[in-house]
Structure formats: C-alpha cells, structure tokens
Amino acid sequence: MSRALVLSVIVGCAAIGAAAVWYTERGAVDTNQVATVVGEYCLDCHNGIDFAGSLRLDDKDMLDIGEDAEIWEHVVRKLKTGMMPPAGEPRPERTTLDGLTANLEQRLDRFAADNPRPGPTVLRRLNRTEYANVIRDLVDLRVDASTLLPLDDSSEGFDNIGSALGVSPSLVESYVSAAMKISRWALGDSTAPRTQVAYAAPQGLDQSRHFDGFPIGTRGGMSFEHLFPLDAEYEIQIRRGFGRGSGRIDFTIDGEPIEAEGIGNLRIPITAGPHTLTVANVDTRRSAGVDDIYSAPPPTGGIQLVEIDGPFNAAGVGDTPSRQRVLICEPTSSEDENDCAREVISTIASRAFRRPLEAEDLPPLVSFYDAGRAEGDFESGIQRALARILVDPRFIYRIERDRTTPENGGAHSIDDYEFATRLSFFIWSSIPDDELLSIAASGLLRDPEVLKRQVERMLADSKSVALVDNFASQWLFLRELESVTPDTEAFTENLRQAMASESEQLFDTIMREDLSILRLLDSEYSFVNEELANHYGYAGVRGSHFRRIDLPDGSQRQGLLGHASILTVTSVTNRTSPVLRGSWILETLLGSPAPTPPPDVETTLEGDDGATVAMTVRERLEAHRANPVCASCHAIMDPIGFSLENFDLIGAWRDTDGGQPIDTQGVLTDGTVLNGPAALREALLARPEAFVTTATEKLLTYALGRGIEYYDMPAIRAIVSQAATEDFRFSALILGVVESEAFGTRATGAIE
Amino acid sequence: MRFLSGKYLSRRALIRGAGAALSLPLLESMFPAGRAWAQSNAVPKVRAGFIYVPHGVTMARWTPAQNGRDFELSEILAPLEPLKQKINVISDLTHPQAYGPGGATAHHNRSSAVFLSGAMAQAGSEARLGTTVDQVIAQAIGQDTPLPSLELMINEGSLSCGDGLSCAYRNTLSWQSATSPLPMERNPQVVFERLFGDGSTDEERAARRAQALSLLDAVSDQIATLERQLPATDRERLDLFLTDVREIERRIERAGSRSSDDLDIPTRPAGIPEDIDEHIKLMMDLQILAWQADITRVTTFQLASELSNTVYPASGVSDAFHILSHHSHIEENKQRFAVLNRYHIGLLTYLLEKLDSLPDGDGSLLDNSVVLYGSGMSDGNEHNHSPLPLLLAGHAGGSLEGGRHLRHDPDTSMSDLLLALLHKLDIEQPNFGDSAGALSV
C-alpha cells in the first residue's frame, strides 16, 4: 500500500468518525440505515468496477454527504422519480426508498443551511421579447422586435439565460439602429418618407368562419396594429384571395367603421400614432339561424393582404401616446427648454436604467440633447437624447453593482432597485413601473408584507401575461406548436391556434385565480371554441369565442395531458410517439430527462422494406424494448407514453391504431399499473412534490437566468414544502422564488 | 390577438417604388449596367459564398455516374448544365465530427454545426464549436470591406432545440470564434439596411451614420466608466460587447468613406415576401448586390434550417421538406425528394447565372468567386454523414478549374476540402477542423 493511500484512508476514517458524532448529537437521523440500503440496492452496479451510469457510490462517505452533495442530489432525483433501482433489479419497499430519500434530503438541506451557496450571478442583457416590452413601457410604443434585433439563443429551455445571450457585431448594430428608429417613432418623424407596408394574413388560416373578436356578421379577416408616422393621408388597399367576389368588406380603424365598398384604393386621413386596423368579409346571405351562420361556406375568398401607403399631405407629428409619455413638460420659452429637457431626460433615463440618476449621469445624456438642439429644435434634441439612453449599456444590460468585500466573500444582498428590476423582469419581462421604483426608493420593498403585496399586484397586472407567453410556453413546449406539421388533413391553422390558446388559458387562469399549480394536471374544466370542441367531440359549442367549459364527467381530458397542444408537440409527423410523450413527461413534469440514446443504437422505427407499416406503434416499440440496452430507459418512458395512446397524433380520441384496438396497459418501474390517461394522472398526483419541484426548478431557472445546479436543490425543496402548506398556490411558488436566497443575492466568481 | 400578421415585402411594392416595370427582376432595377464599384477595381477580388441545405439528398440521383472531366450531370444537378464548365462535383467526403461523442446517433443540429467548422457541437449551457471556414476567410479578406461577411437564412430561427444542444448549432452556420455564433438574418429589409444604411437620401444616410458613430462613441465611454465598478466576469462580457462596438464603428466609417455617386441605391424592401421562392431569390439578389458593390466578399446562406418543414410550391412537390427526407426507403418518396433537391439546385443556378452575367475584371463575377454548396447530411432517412453531397462553383479568380466530378477515398473529412479552399484563397494555414491535409481540387 502506497503511502498516499494509507494517508487518505486514515483521513477518511477520521472524517467519518467526526460526522457520525455530529449527527448523533442532533439525534434525528439514523445514518446506518442509509449505508445498509445503499449497500444492498445500489452498490451492485454503482461501484468502481461496473461504474453504471458513470456513478460509483462505494467510495462515498455516507455519513458526511455534504462534501459529495452533487452526487447525492443526483441520487435523490433518481429515487424521487422512481428511476432507480431500475426495472428488473431488486427494489426495496417504497417506504424504505422514501425513508432513504428523506434522510438524504434532510442532511443535504442541513449542510446547505450551514454552507449557503446562492450560485453565481450572470450578467444578462435584454432579449428580444424583453426589449419590445421595455420599449412599450418606456415610451408607449409597440415595436416588432423581430425586425429590430437578431434572434436570441436559448439554453436550459429558456431564451433569457445569461450565458446564452451572446453578442455579435450584428447585435450591436441592431441596438444602435433600433435606438435611432425608436427615438424617431416615439416623437414623430416629420421627415418620414412615403413608404409602402404590407400586412399579410397568416397563411393557411381558414377564413370561412367568424374569428373571435371580429365584428358580428363577418367571416375571416385580419387585424393588426400599424404605427402611422404622421397626421396625414394614407392609401389603404385590401386584397382578397381566390374567388374574389364583390362582397362587402367590414373595415374598421380602432373600431370605427370606414366606408369601404369592396376592394380598391382608399385614401383617408389618419392621425399619427398606433391604430388597429381590422378587415373582414361581410356575410350578406340570409341565414335561417345560428347554426346556419356558423356552418355555411364563405361568401368570397379570404382577406389576403392589407397594404398601407403614405404619408401624403402630412400635417404634422400629431398627438400620439408616445409623445404624451415622453414629453412630460412643454417649454414655453427658450429659457424653459433646458430645464424641461433635463426633466424629460432624467425621467426617461431613470426608468430605462431602473434607478435614479446620480449627479454625474445627467451631463453626458444632456450633451446629446444639446447637439440635437443645435441642429434642430427642442424635440430633435430630445430625440437624440432618447437614442442615447437606448444604447446605454445600463439599459441593454441588467448591470448590478458589485459590493464584493473580503468579508462577504463575493456574495452580498442586492439593493432594492436591483431587486425591483429582477422582480419585474421575472414577472413582467420588462422594467419596473413607477410604483415599484418608488417602493424601492422607500427601502421597504423587501419587507415580507410589502413584497407579498407587490408580487400580488404584479401578478394581477395584465403585464404578467409574460409568464404565460414566455415562461409557460417555453416550459411546456407550447412554442413548438408553431413548427409542427402533423401529416393529417384534420390539422388546420385554425386548430393549431386553438390548441395553443387552450393551454395558455389554463395556465393564465391558474395564475390569475391563484389556484394550485396541480390544476395544470387535473383541471376539471377547459377552454375551447367551436373548432377545438369539434376536435374533442364536444357538442354544443358554437362560434369562435373561447369559453370555459366544465369537462364531462369522467373526461379523459382533465389537465394538460388531455390537451391537444401537448399531445401534438409530442407526436412525430405521421404517428404518435409514446417515447416522446414519455420523455416529455419525465423532462417537463418530473424534471428527470431521459438520457439520449447510447452510441450505435438504431432509433428509427421504420424497417428497411417499409413492411412495418401495418404494425402498431406499440408492436414496433415492444420489439425495440426487447433490446436490453434500450430497455433500461424505455421501460420507464414507454409505459407513460402508452397510457396516452388513445390520443392520436393531434390529440383526437381513437380506439384503434393500424386496425388494432389501442392497448394502454403498462407498468411503471415502481409497480404502479397504468391503463389510460386517468391512471397516469393519478400516478403523477399521487406524489405531487415531484411535479411541483420541477415547476419550481423551471421558475427559478427562468427567474435567475441560469441553469439549476445541485446546490440550488435545498432552496427548491424549501419553496416546495412552504408552498405545500398553501396547497401549492401559484403565488406561493412565485413568492418562494423571489424570497429565495439566490434571487436576492449577487454572487460573483469569487466564491466559485 | 392571434391574427396579427407580420409585415412582409410586397415585391410589387418594391418594384413600384423603384419606378420600374413589374416584370423587371430586382437586380436590373437596382443596378444600371456599368455603375458598380467592383468593376473599377484593377485587380478583381475573390468572393467566397457558402450555401447550406439540410436533410441530405437522394444520393443515387445526385452523384454523377462518370468521374473526371467526362461526366454527365445527374438528374438532381441537371439545372447546372449551362454552367457545367464552372462547377466541380465533389464526392465521397464525410464529416466525422457530425456523429457526436462516441459516435452517438447523429442528428440534425450536429449536421449544420459541423458543416463549415469541422468541429463537434458541444452540449452545455454555453454553445461551443470552432471558427468556421467562412469566418477564417472573412478575417483574412473581409477586412477591407464595410462588412467582413454577411450571414443569411430563410427559415425563422428555432427557440427550442432539444438534446441539450444550443439552438445556435441550428440557427447559424457561421462562428466567429469557438464561442461566438453569428446570427443569420432572414428579413431582406434588415439585410438591405445593413448593406446600404438606414435612410431614403444620401444626406439622410450620412446624417444617420454620424449619429450612430456618436452613439457608439458614448457607449464605449460608458462601458469604460462602468467597468471600473464591475467584477472580472462581468467585465469580460462587456469587453466582448465593446469589441463589437468598435467593429461597428469601423464598418460605419468604411461605409462612409465610399463615394455613393458610384452606386444607385435601390428601394428598400418592405419585409419578408410571402412566397418562399421569391424570398430566397430576393436574398440571393441582395447577396449578389453586396458582392458586386464590394460591400462584402464573404456570404453564408442557410437555404433552409435543419428540421425545416418548408413546402416549396414552385418545386412541384407538395411535401414538407424534413418529412419527405424521411423517405422510409420507399422509392417513390426518394424520387419526390430528388425533385425537391433538384429545385434547390435550380435556386443555386439562379444565383450562379446572375453572378456569371455580371462582368468583373476580365471575367465574370462567378469567375472571381468560389461558392460551396451542400449538406451536412447524406441520407435524410438514415441521418448519416457519408458521402456528403457537395459541389463547388466558380473559378476562385483562376485558382480553381471546373467541369469535373472529383472522387476521393471514402472517409476523407470534408475539413480537407475546407482547408483546400483556404489555400485556394491564399490563406495559408496547416490545419482546419479535423483535416488530415488539404484535398486536391
């Protein structure tokens, strides 16, 4: 035995002795049981020779697990999701596994409490979505960020992850050019040249039906907001698709009817600013009743395009919401100009930078006003200063001041303005509003009662829809709906939109009514319009309007697992995929993604001769699971996926596949028998912590802009167990996240 | 409101704005003969273009039957017939790094990632690959032009890419360094502004350039002030931003130093055309314009993104691209896929013929260019990466012959070809990606 090894053995024994005493003193944990269970059920594979899953536990200190927290957190995750011990291997009683898990968790949590580690703070820049929201809140202007900024990269399932938000010359160029454009649009550009802009209706949308929110008695159509640069005349041309008849068109601007007989050029005066244009075909046929209105074919081809040309005979920049928002004072004399300019600039800049300006911050901004004023008038000065603010790194980046000292070791509490900014980007994907900033100024924001009220206020605000559009749609893969192309005629553009809407509305309802997040899995109601109701086979739902309906008794569609959206994004083009559905549930709901297939494994289901076509998906997968290499993971994924086989590739109900009756039987690794969606739902709800833990991990990832690490798990468990006392209400999770150590702390590389 | 639709370019509107007849192709309306900058250059500069198609092709209908000079173009390559003497079909190469660690089941994102890098896509929260060949070229020959390179795409970028791999591997083909993927642009209007600046008159463009420079100046100052208060990790990130600020300053100054008398600036496109064929051709027109006006000498164009399910009505095939590539070994599917492959070659031909019609020095713009076209996948159903469908067009200023079907040892890395390309452009470096040595072309 070499000298070094002898030494390490001695040191190792000493450590075990010390830890045992330490835990014995506290008296709560029987660590011997852990060693026995692990020894009996884990070490056969997870040892230095077999090294299964690149993990060995035989050399780990089971008494002092804090030092190997990363490995033990991994073990906890596998145990909690029932992935280990694997199918076919001896497995102890569930109570034993639960006891083991609880023991490990308690000790890991205690270690973390004594060794807090908030995790590194990453510098984040505004992504596209945030940029557009911020411009809306800052200067009351809706911009299409996809035409202003390059696409962001995403990571960890979200597009607001600091490390993935890189920079490139194109990005810098885009920020500069966007700043110049937005400053012109916000104040009005008297030199705006005549331009043509065309808006096209989304392709593939069936316009034979009435669209929700469109005038009664119309069919199809399109609606969009356009920014008219000046008070002027504009030419508007509406084009229809095939079968263009002479039917009347219903054309409104901000809801005001515009006389438009048919199609053709129309020149009308329009005031500067954003206006909503809505165009739809008028249904002029007589109808016998409600059913007839909603079922008859369209009178003419759908609206294809609206083109806006202008301005002509411009009268001025007008009075727009943006101008009202920006120009908060009006100089009455040239002496007033300087003071007013300073007021305007410092107001915008403090909103844009999310904190009051320091004395030295103002002059560099005012110098841009001065330069613009020298070349033009007061407003051209303001315009220049606004552009300057919009390229400032304090605007583009969420910069937090570093207060690292030798004493705090690089981790310190952020100030209230920085906290307000984290809060508003988390809940609104935008900057704090004036109320939040003023509470930050008062120094009371982190008072628990004040913070709770603010979080509730923010969730109630319409801007919290960002949590649906950005957080939920990325977490649940709803964004993928935009790119799926199921190979069936039943899948239409209208249905695609309806599917997305149903799931978004469920999440939105849980958020706004502050319900338990478990309702995502078992809501007994849903949100449908006629399109979706027909898809589901529900009778009596008429029209394009979405409404909340109570699901029929015993419905298989309770919760997300019955939503066509989820069932569609987890299918492949021409069939269902129990594997994808199983892996979606593991990753998205249980937070334990299945590993990617090992090397040299055939993953396609098709044979060489196409003769497999007649086999059911199940038959094909059973063959595939016969391979032990595949079976280790597929034994977990496939039964989950099979239980949803009654839903076809776009989530419609079916009783047969390939001529064979659907077989939803399956057994989970822990012995739970599944035989359909209801049983799967029950299995998930039987241990709600697994799902809520995943939801919390995703929320924290999104809130912090970084991936979750093993050292975050104690904080996540704390949030989940606190939320459990409140039936996992949505606001309890949000509040748990914002009150967590990591959310309120800035940690630099110093402690990494 | 779900029915809100995006702005797109009405090509008709564009042509009307340019005051030209409806049927006139964009390029002619933009460039009256004899007005381009490039022609005034005594020594023509070589341009390099890269065009990527995902999902492989029906190889049996791509690879020419004969080798060497005496070969006939295959069914898929037939549209290139008029340019046969200016192209080389390159067969039998592979991209080993596409197979991923330990030869794991290869997939789409790795195919686009490896194509111009010869490097393996790395999993993890930060994307890591390698400098791509187009960027090596841009760093060598792109520094004299306002834009070192131009990156174009057609499909919308993906926001969620799975497999623990960054979307950057799918959304771009161009990497300035191992950790800086360059975004590709799909909106012709944005490309146009990048080429010509924002504004409707010379004075306006000049004024906006001046404003942009003053803004960039302020950003540099502000970063310097801020950095004093920031820890090293944040400073590093802001330094990257600052580097790009300087690069944009350089570009604007260079653009400003051009005499715009030499160039008729065409009318700005209003957005993305609804028709995919039109969209692609408009992007190609902009690329040609950028080369002709010597705004850039390097372009990389992702004709479609991995997993794209675009339908191309003009191809005569109504199947979605990715779905069709999974032909299930059904001959009829393979045949239809070949029709789609041939349509894509038709688009390439559109670009090459335009380039060949434009005089440049003693020859044509195509003679002074090299364009690499191909896919990072071989058979879309098998997800394999050998042999790759590849071809080179243009004479690279005289250093590249044409009219050949070149075959190689199977398992030769495509990196050998990329290295050979660098050498053709007088960029001497001993290795590229996983190359074993320059391929003889």
Image (cartoon, coloured by chain):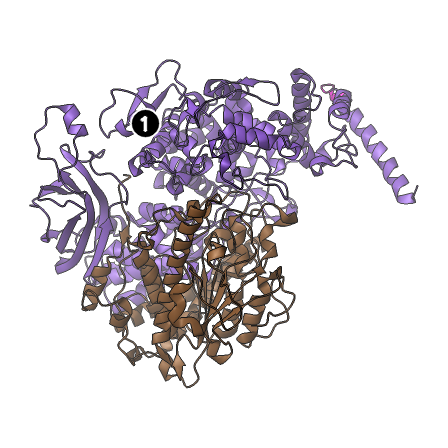
Residue A524, by quadrant, is top left
Query: Chain A colour?
Result: purple
Residue A512, by quadrant, is top left
Dot 1 lies on which element?
A: helix
Q: Which chain is brown?
A: B
Residue that mark 1 sits on? A535
Question: In the image, residue A726 lies at what x, y percent?
Answer: 48, 20
Question: In the image, residue A519 lies at what x, y percent?
Answer: 43, 22
Question: In the image, residue B295 lies at what x, y percent?
Answer: 39, 72
How many numbered tags mark residues here?
1
**In this view of the protein, can residue B140 be seen by the observer?**
yes
Instruction: Please identify the residue farthest to the top as the structure is shown.
Output: A553
The image shows residue A196, relative to residue B68, as above or below, that is above
Question: In the image, residue A556 lies at what x, y percent?
Answer: 41, 19
Kindly identify the residue that appears in the image at 42 percent across and 51 percent down.
B335
Left or right of A662 in this view: A548 = left
**In this view of the protein, can residue A254 be seen by the observer?**
no
Observer-nearest of B240 and A75: A75
The quadrant of the picture occupied by the N terminus of chain B is top left
Left or right of B104 in this view: B268 = left
Observer-nearest of A664 and A747: A664
Observer-nearest of A727 and A482: A482
Left or right of A1 in this view: A415 = left
Callout 1 amino acid:
His
- Is-magenta flag for residue B32? no
The local crowd at label 1, few if under 14, some if 14 to 19, many if 20 or more residues have their Cα within 10 Å, is some
**Start-end of magenta stretch:** A25-29
The image shows residue B429, relative to residue B174, as above or below, that is below
Kindly identify the residue that appears in the image at 60 percent across and 50 percent down.
B100
